[in-house]
Image (cartoon, rainbow, N blue to C red):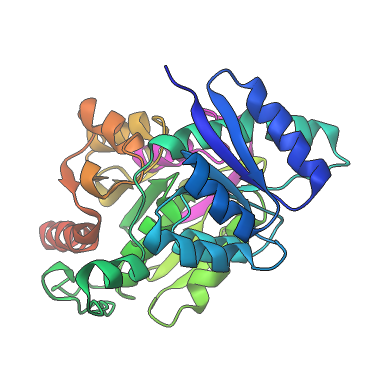
Amino acid sequence: MEKIKVLVVEDSLMFRSLLVKYINMDPDLSVVAVASDPFEARDAIIRYKPDVMTLDVELPKMDGIEFLRKLMPQYPMHTIVISTLSNRVFDALNAGAVDFVAKPLTTNKEALDEFVKKELPGKIKVAATAKIRKTYAQKVLEQGTIPKMPIAGNDGENSPNVSLRRDEHLIVAIGASTGGTEATTSILEQFGPDIPGVVVTQHMPEGFTKMYADRLNQRSNIRLTVKEAQSGDIVLPGHVYIAPGGDKHMEIVRANNQYKIVLKRGEKVNGHRPSVEVLFQSVAREAGKNAVGIILTGMGGDGAKGLLAMKQAGAKTIGQDESTCVVYGMPRVAYEMGAVDYQEKLQNISRKTYSIIAQMQKEN
């Protein structure tokens, strides 16, 4: 099997050398070129045709995100962004990056070893096989006109066309990984304040989950209250709770006829913490038939068994289809084990969710 060709774009000579050394130690990867700024990177892409680019955000001559925005419409590239704790990684994902990794503190040897030997090589391998999501700029180039931008709750055939009554007995659980930040955002854009409480586990490093939640909460086209979850939070309709990255898993428990968030320390499950599996298993146990489970784009099978447990407990389940996934991993595993009631394109998931909940409320 041919090695995955990698371009490393990083202005720090020391960190660049470190990346090259450890990426080349992986038998499946080979660094074919390095660049210290976007202009060198552009030339290297043309000359070496790498499969994956690792891209630092802070670069001389041109910002890494600006470079990505200029590059992707003309030369779509599987890109992993390397960033310190910054809200700007979400701009990079919006610009077309497949995923991001948090740059470790070089003074922390354990974190550095985890990063260069396991996390980054793994992300590169996933990125090499991922589907590059078309950005808005790419669509403009392809169509020759400015595409119509959907308005939340009013995008024609894909918008929810039913109204729901306030319901604290129902809950919506979402699990996602690679490509999931943009996928989850697109679903939440179509949810209205009448949606039951939403709990989300998205594989993401510590610190970034709060930035992600705050960013969603500040968006004018999202009509929900979004926050990073805390233990003791009561799950309310029209509210979204994002599992915090770090050393805890997120679960729900039933208390006083309401759902409450519980964060528990624990070992990684399916290689992740927080894990979608842990969340879905708790929803199956505590909510049963009063839940909707949604599994989105991501590598591996985290959450698939939990989604099956939800279905077996009477919940309705939705899996994102292959054509709209950045990585058709988690939804595929769930679908193949019979955990998915409805396999839907991303743009149809919000409407399907509303339809399911409306039927649940009618039956209750």
Measuring 27% from the left and 80% from the top, which residue is drawn there?
151
Q: Is residue 72 above or below residue 313?
A: below
Question: Range of the magenta residues?
Answer: 258-284
Q: Is residue 293 left or right of residue 50?
A: left
| Viewer-proximal residue among 185 and 232 | 185
Quadrant of the image for the N terminus?
A: top left
Toward the bottom, the furthest residue is 220
On whether residue 135 falls in the magenta region, the answer is: no
Residue 234 visible in the current orientation: no
Q: Is residue 201 left or right of residue 283?
A: right
| Viewer-proximal residue among 191 and 298 | 298
Give percent across and percent down for residue 8.
63, 43
Res 139 → quadrant: bottom left
Q: Is residue 309 above or below residue 136?
A: above
Residue 1 visible in the current orientation: yes
On whether residue 281 falls in the magenta region, the answer is: yes
Q: Is residue 282 left or right of residue 189?
A: right
Toward the right, the furthest residue is 107
Give percent across and percent down for residue 175.
40, 46
Measuring 51% from the left and 33% from the top, which residue is drawn there?
5
Measuring 50% from the left and 38% from the top, which residue is drawn there?
275
Measuring 30% from the left and 57% from the top, which residue is drawn there?
170
Q: Is residue 178 above or below residue 166?
A: above
